[in-house]
Image (cartoon, rainbow, N blue to C red):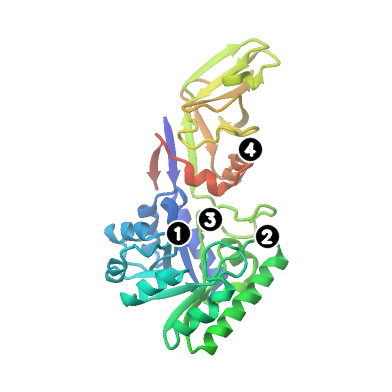
Amino acid sequence: MREIRVDLAAIVENYRSLKALCAPAQVMAIVKANAYGHGQIEVARALQDAGVDALGVADLAEAFTLRLAGIESRVMCWILNPTDDFALAVEQKIELGVSSFEVLEKALATNSPILHIKVDTGLGRNGFAESEWEQVFEALSGKSVGIFSHLANTSTEDDLEQQRQFEQAIELANSFGVKITQRHLSASAGALQYPQMRYDMVRCGIAVYGLNPFEDRGIEEYSLRPAMRVSARVANVKRVPAGQGVSYGYRYVTENETNLALVPFGYFEGIPRVSVGAKVLIAGEQYPVVGRVAMDQFVVDVGADQVVIGDEVVIFGDAAKGEPTAEALGESSGSINYEIVTRIGGRAQRVFE
């Protein structure tokens, strides 16, 4: 009735395309947030089999999950708390992204083998502030660490300024005798857009899954294809007269006599309740989702067409196949494809191929 089909081969192909594009830089594949909704363990195994350079997750819980599943590839995480189990992180060979003195003290006390120091170059989130750089690099004098930051993707001018600050941080670290083992600044958008910002490694998340990291340009020039296809089956069809209100609040009222198809996929499964103007694919035609999305279902106006119970409804997939996209569904709700794919699930069955 509800299916999320994940093409692991597409993910591997996307990763290899990114590797070829970014060479000689390494590519860390980000599998945080259940691999952006695609299935963390299954995706990590496929990428490990493909020889992934490294895997990235947000926190230690996600990192330990990978190790418990038998993933032996490099794993890095970067949202840490001083109360985290650093001894277990050392035992499990987890690489740590450090952004505070409290975490740095604990990590050094447990002899964490590989640390990556995050410097805030302008995003204003995690990372050591510029005023703290001298103190942190002085504490690390003579030690070997990685150094990284994250672009805000606000404008080319802002991104270039962040790169300038990143270079400044590297120069300062060198002046204190810190041995930098790996430099990484760019995530998916930066890796695609700025060859000069690839350094020793890039961290690619959304692009690994074949989705667009940009809001103002396409990615047709890159060899990437969406790995997730979400579908359901029509559960009911009814003929209604003109003037029929549809779903809660009658946000949509039919202008003419028409056929309405009911699709058992609601906001519990991750379809945004506030979505307006989304379309789905049924029997080769795209039709509008009408009325308010409910917890378990939404309604499609198929006009005079003869849709029947059991017909497949493609909610999003690959534009190259004429299917609606995660980007379009995100736009219909004032959101982005990242949020769509990471929230998708509920009662839908995941199928890996």
Rendering coords of residue 107 (x, y %)? 36, 73
Task: Determine whether, in the image, residue 141 is placed left or right of residue 73.
Answer: right
Compare residues 306 and 252 and report the one nearer the observer.
Answer: 252
Q: Which residue corresponds to the image point at 33% horizontal and 59% vertical from the top-left?
A: 66
Q: Residue at x 57, y 59 (%)?
A: 223
The residue beneath circle 3 is 206
Q: Amino acid at mark 3?
A: Ile
Of discs 2 and 1, which sits in the foreground? 2
The dot on residue 188 is none
Calculate the distance from the C-alpha at mark 2 to the C-alpha at mark 1.
29 Å
Alpha carbon separation for disc pair 1 and 4: 29 Å
Nearer the observer: mark 1 or 4; the answer is 4
Q: Residue at x 30, y 64 (%)?
A: 85
Q: Alpha-carbon distance for marks 1 and 3?
A: 13 Å
Looking at the rendered structure, the secondary structure element under dot 3 is helix
Q: Determine which residue is flagged by label 1.
A: 12
Q: Which of the two discs, 3 and 2, labels the residue nearer the N terminus?
A: 2
| Mark sitting earlier along the chain (4/3) | 3
Q: Which residue is mark 4?
A: 332
Q: Position of residue 62 (x, y in %)?
A: 37, 57
